[in-house]
Amino acid sequence: MKLGFVGLPNVGKTTIFNALTGAGAESSNYPFSTVEANLAAVEVPDARLDALAAMFNPKKITPATANFVDIAGLARGASRGEGLGNRFLAHIREVDAILHVIRCFDDPNVVHVESGIDPIRDRDTINIELCMADLEVVEKRIQRVEKAAKGDKSLLREAELFTALKNHLDEGLTARSFACSDEDQELISDCPLLTLKPTLYCANLSETDFKARDSYKPYLDLTEAAKEEGAAVFPICAKLEQEIMQMEPGDRALFLEDLGMTLSGRDRLIQISYDLMGLMSFLTAGAPEVRAWTITKGMKAPQAAGKIHKDLQRGFIRAEVVSFDALMECGSMAAAKDKGLVRSEGKEYVMRDGDVVLFRFNV
Ligand SMILES: Nc1nc2c(ncn2[C@@H]2O[C@H](COP(=O)(O)OP(=O)(O)O)[C@@H](O)[C@H]2O)c(=O)[nH]1
Ligand SMILES: [Mg+2]
């Protein structure tokens, strides 16, 4: 899972990236200070791993990992190659989801490239650049389909669909907000469009406004505007997260409690990103290793086995599955088996979050 921070310069992308990953990338009050993308892997928090470790005493505990990428500031004109534009767009193409950071903090000492706090304008500025990049892709597709349609009239409808999408993008509207049938949606999804990627707007607020965000107008306006395009807003205070990540775990819990939260920004962000991308985890547990694996919701047992090793998918026989909760209630794998709670599932089994699995396979 690769999550990319995208946004205008000086909105706090690198500060949030550092606070969340502890990576120590350079952050400064200087637009375009980040030229190359910064990359960091973080462990996906999962309390179930500790519980399983207590039961299996494994040699190794391996959490799932999420990769964060801090992509350099995108400015007006990026799609025309300005401000190192196209290189940034190339980085965005590689991510699974976009974390679009929007400046909601006011600070006269930090240059605002667009002058003044206006989250909706800033969101649109970035989205328009992404839409323009998508337009190029869609225009090429239209040309290709129209040419092919000369020999195959059944492709005319596809050309019409992409022309309608082009008009939508032309208005600065994202591809994900383009209304069409499921069938058309499938055609569009195999087009590599930036504005089709799952996107979360991260509102970077001052400490005061973060605490009182329910009455902070720029934040409320952004939430309202995001709702209209079916997107979510994630409130975060970069400065606070910086402090939180530097605390001892015990102090951290108390501090979060004071803020009325149970999870740090990093943990909340990972959780929301999982939901956004329709991801979930299954678990494997034994004496050598207890481990969490990330898969997409709806994935069947053989494909899930393939995440561990292609041989497990190829030679898949069956999966022995017990839910994490049932296993914990029983206290041991042997007890769960005795109670008939370890099920034998075949090729059509749809994996569930928290399944503890042993795959049987032919070599
Ligand atoms: N007051 C305030 N300053 C911030 C906040 N987040 C970032 N900054 C400052 O804004 C400047 C640019 O931040 P940076 O993370 O490098 O922005 P980027 O260009 O989006 O990566 C730095 O001087 C940061 O210290 C915040 O929440 N509040
Ligand atoms: Mg930066």
Image: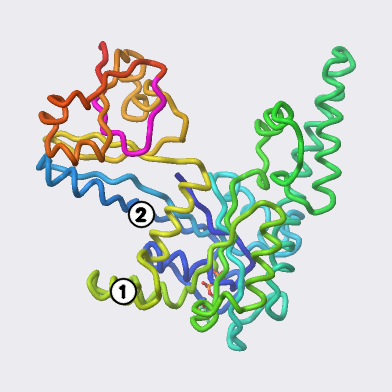
- Mark 1: which secondary structure? helix
Image quarter (top left, top right, bottom left or bottom right) of the C terminus: top left
Residue that numbered label 1 is attached to: 246
Identify which amino acid the numbered label 1 is placed on: Gln
When asked about the image quadrant of residue 357, the answer is top left
Q: Do the residues labelled 1 and 2 touch (CB within 8 Å)?
A: no
Identify which amino acid the numbered label 2 is placed on: Val
Q: Does the magenta stretch include residue 132?
A: no
Residue 90 location (% of width, % of height): 61, 48
Against 229, residue 233 (above or below) is below
When asked about the image quadrant of residue 213, the answer is bottom right
**Magenta highlight range:** 349-358
Q: Is residue 59 left or right of residue 150?
A: left
User: What colouring method underlies this structural image?
Assistant: rainbow
Q: Which residue is drawn at 32% across and 38% down?
A: 354
First of labels 1, 2 by sequence position: 2
Q: Which residue lies furthest to the front in this view?
A: 339
Query: Observer-nearest residue: 291 or 259?
Result: 259
**Disc number for residue 42:** 2
Q: Which residue is drawn at 84% across and 30% down?
A: 143
Q: Which residue lies furthest to the right in this view?
A: 150
Against 251, residue 151 (above or below) is above
Against 28, residue 19 (above or below) is above
Looking at mark 2, is its residue's CB closer than 8 Å to ligand 1? no
**Disc number for residue 134:** none
Image quarter (top left, top right, bottom left or bottom right) of the N terminus: top left
Dominant SS of magenta comes to loop
Q: In this view, does 112 lie to the left or right of 320?
A: right
Residue 149 location (% of width, % of height): 86, 18
